[in-house]
Amino acid sequence: MADVKVVHFIRHGEAEHNVAARRHGCQEYRNWAYLDAPLTEKGRGQAREAQKVVLAQMKPQVVLVSPLTRTLQTAEEVFQPLMDSSEGKPRFEVCEGVRERIGHHPCDKRRTVSELKPQFPQFSFDAILDEDDCLWSEAREPTEDILQRAKAFLEVLRQRSENCIGVVSHSAFLTAMFVVLTTECGLRSDGPDGPPDITSASSPDAVANGGPMNGESKPYFANGEVKTVVILPHSS
């Protein structure tokens, strides 16, 4: 069916700010030393493990990637075999809509397009309208706003022409995405604890302990984790 979408949702591998928060507490998220933090070597290894999962399934025709360094690096590691292929190479599009919860944390502020493009030449930055990160501010994005962003992105997925799509994103956004998929698309969430808590999705405790469980379709993503979802057309 042309309107059925297979979507591989992938969280970035471990990055430097994740390690700092585990070792020294959540105040490290406010440390400007971790501006647009890159992957650690362990994070690159997690992305290469994710590669095995993704490439064993239906291969994406397009990959939508957050503009932060850790997600771009993760996409490179996960999809390197397809990047080097002469046939079936997906398009790699940088997408502001799937970035981490915006604001307050320097690790979630992207670098300029001029800095990123030479470092990631295989990616299209055509959809990034501003050279500087005009979305980031000292205020943290409210829960309702990130849920609305996830709802808008679900419609983007539905309207795209591709049948298989990769999405490389972050813990809070992916948690919001799975709240939307659970409430609007009927994705099973059989856990006893009710709706997932987006505010805890990227906390140091969640990162260290594997995240809050929520039944078979737990919305929290560990570093480098892949979840594949089939999105059916709207019911008539």
Image (cartoon, helix red, strand yellow):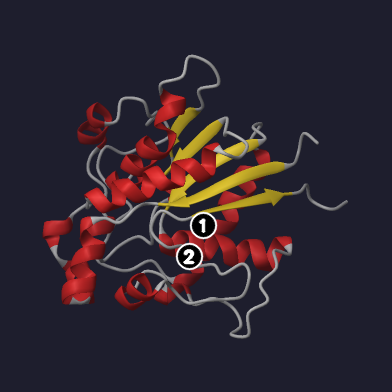
* Outermost residue to the top: 86
Residue sitting at x 43%, y 28% = 81
Q: Which mark is residue 163?
A: none
* Quadrant of the rendering where the N terminus is positioned: top right
Where 24 falls versus 136 (above or below)? below
Residue occupying the point 49% across, 59% down: 174
> Is residue 71 found left or right of 186 in the rendered image?
left
Residue ID for mark 1: 149
Image coordinates of residue 221 in percent, x first then y, are 46, 62
> In the displayed structure, does residue 94 sit left or right of residue 57?
left
Q: Are marks 2 and 1 in contact (CB under 8 Å)?
A: yes
Q: Amino acid at mark 1?
A: Arg
Look at label 2 and name its amino acid: Asp
CA neighbours of label 2 inside 10 A, class few (<14), some (14 to 19), many (20+): few
Compare residues 76 and 41 and report the one nearer the observer: 41
Q: For the residues marked 2 and 1, what is the alpha-carbon distance in whole angstroms?
A: 6 Å
Q: In the image, residue 189 lies at what x, y percent?
A: 66, 72
- Say if 96 sits above or below 100 in the image: above
> x%, y% of residue 220?
48, 67
Q: Can the viewer see residue 39 in this picture? A: no
Give the residue pinned by disc 2. 145
